[in-house]
């Protein structure tokens, strides 16, 4: 059936082409997100991938699966996009931690890495695939691979995350197998240095994730600062894209959340004027943060928070602010 659809698509049948590509749209979107660090950019890349694939479907020779051919097209679309724009960094990679009690600066126009809702990931076919998929989407992994040159990033995703043979990756990227092996070794070395505890990041159970999130929500909404601090690891960080300012350590985080703040951040302090709706992002527990409106009639969207858990507690709280489109992406209500 697949071969027949390919023949029909190559003969100009758009419906046959749509039948070929529709089962792979979701996974292509995830792959493009890993490459680009933004769900919005990933959507653009998928649309460009489908356009290129349609115009070049006649070049598909059947030496690989149609799915692998689509991945090759998508990867090269992403590489083209990365030539036109800067990588998406993480505040901790660009700036030093702020001093406890310091006031955040103004938001920046740096294109920061963005979160990805678990609802778009789809279901893994096995428990092993589920673990691999979770590792390949977690923020620690993504912030690390953003440091890689684009072609190394592509090789790592194809060979490590998707388990492609080096020869197949070489064909997709117009490289030699030797060059692929070399790029993969360099990428793996960088990743090992940046995320030495990759296995530990996957040990927490879904139940543990859910319990920690529930405790955080309760502590945040009730202004229980002691309870919130008790959930934090000693090296915990609070990052707030698009603000470049970030804080490290439970004391600094608590001081920031409890102190007066400028502009819209002033209302983000913990307390009854906030509402947190649980969700999931990047294979991690997350929440939608809502702030009480000025007239106190509703709670309005403010940011998407993502928790990175470690063996000793919450290692990082990332709150993505000033981007209302994220609430639509996460299918969260416009008011709480």
Image (tube, rainbow, N blue to C red):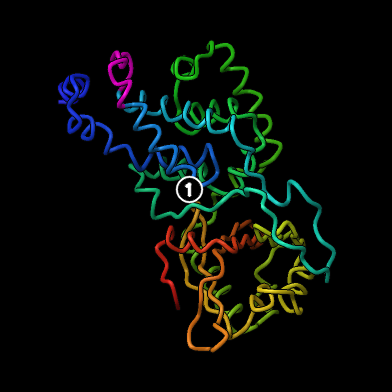
Q: Is residue 309 visible?
A: yes
In percent of the image, x 48 and y 84: which residue is there? Answer: 298
Instruction: Judge whether 14 appears above or below 204 on screen.
Output: above
Could you say where residue 17 lies in the image, as x and y percent from the top left? 23, 30
| SS assignment at label 1 | helix
Picture quarter with the N terminus: top left
Could you say where residue 261 lies in the image, as x and y percent from the top left? 74, 75
Answer with left or right where residue 7 lies relative to residue 323.
Answer: left
Q: Is residue 208 visible?
A: no
Could you say where residue 280 lies in the image, as x and y percent from the top left? 47, 60
Magenta-drawn segment: 54-65
Which of 122 and 172 lies nearest the eye of the viewer? 172
Dot 1, crowdedness within 10 Å: few (<14), some or many (≥20)? many
Instruction: Judge whether 333 appears above or below 318 on screen.
Output: below
User: Where is mark 1, residue-wise?
Assistant: 39
Q: Is residue 38 magenta?
A: no
Picture quarter with the C terminus: bottom left
In percent of the image, x 49 and y 19: which residue is there? Answer: 173
In percent of the image, x 41 and y 26: which residue is there? Answer: 73
């Amino acid at each position: 059936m697949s071969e027949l659809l390919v023949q029909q698509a190559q003969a100009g049948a758009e419906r046959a082409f749509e039948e070929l590509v529709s089962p792979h749209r979701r996974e292509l979107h995830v792959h493009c997100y890993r490459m680009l660090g933004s769900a919005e950019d990933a959507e653009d890349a998928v649309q460009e991938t489908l356009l290129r694939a349609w115009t070049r479907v006649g070049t598909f020779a059947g030496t690989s699966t149609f799915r692998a051919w689509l991945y090759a097209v998508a990867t090269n679309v992403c590489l083209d996009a990365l030539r036109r724009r800067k990588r998406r960094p993480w505040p901790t990679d660009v700036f030093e931690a702020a001093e406890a009690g310091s006031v955040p600066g103004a938001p920046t126009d740096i294109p920061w890495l963005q979160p990805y809702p678990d609802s778009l990931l789809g279901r893994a076919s096995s428990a092993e695939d589920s673990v691999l998929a979770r590792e390949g989407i977690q923020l620690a992994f993504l912030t690390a691979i953003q440091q890689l040159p684009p072609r190394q990033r592509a090789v790592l995703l194809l060979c490590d995350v998707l388990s492609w043979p080096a020869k197949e990756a070489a064909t997709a990227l117009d490289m030699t197998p030797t060059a692929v092996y070399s790029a993969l070794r360099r990428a793996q070395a960088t990743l090992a240095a940046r995320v030495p505890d990759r296995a530990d990041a996957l040990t927490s159970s879904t139940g543990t994730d859910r319990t920690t999130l529930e405790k955080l929500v309760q502590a945040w909404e009730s202004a229980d600062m002691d309870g919130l601090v008790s959930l934090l690891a000693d090296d915990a960080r609070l990052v707030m894209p698009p603000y470049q300012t970030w804080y490290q350590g439970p004391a600094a985080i608590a001081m920031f959340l409890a102190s007066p703040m400028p502009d819209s951040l002033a209302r983000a302090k913990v307390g009854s004027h906030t509402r947190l709706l649980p969700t999931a992002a990047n294979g991690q527990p997350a929440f939608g943060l809502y702030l009480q409106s000025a007239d106190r009639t509703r709670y309005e969207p403010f940011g998407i928070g993502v928790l990175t858990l470690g063996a000793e507690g919450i290692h990082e709280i990332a709150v993505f602010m000033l981007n209302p489109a994220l609430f639509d992406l996460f299918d969260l209500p416009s008011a709480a």
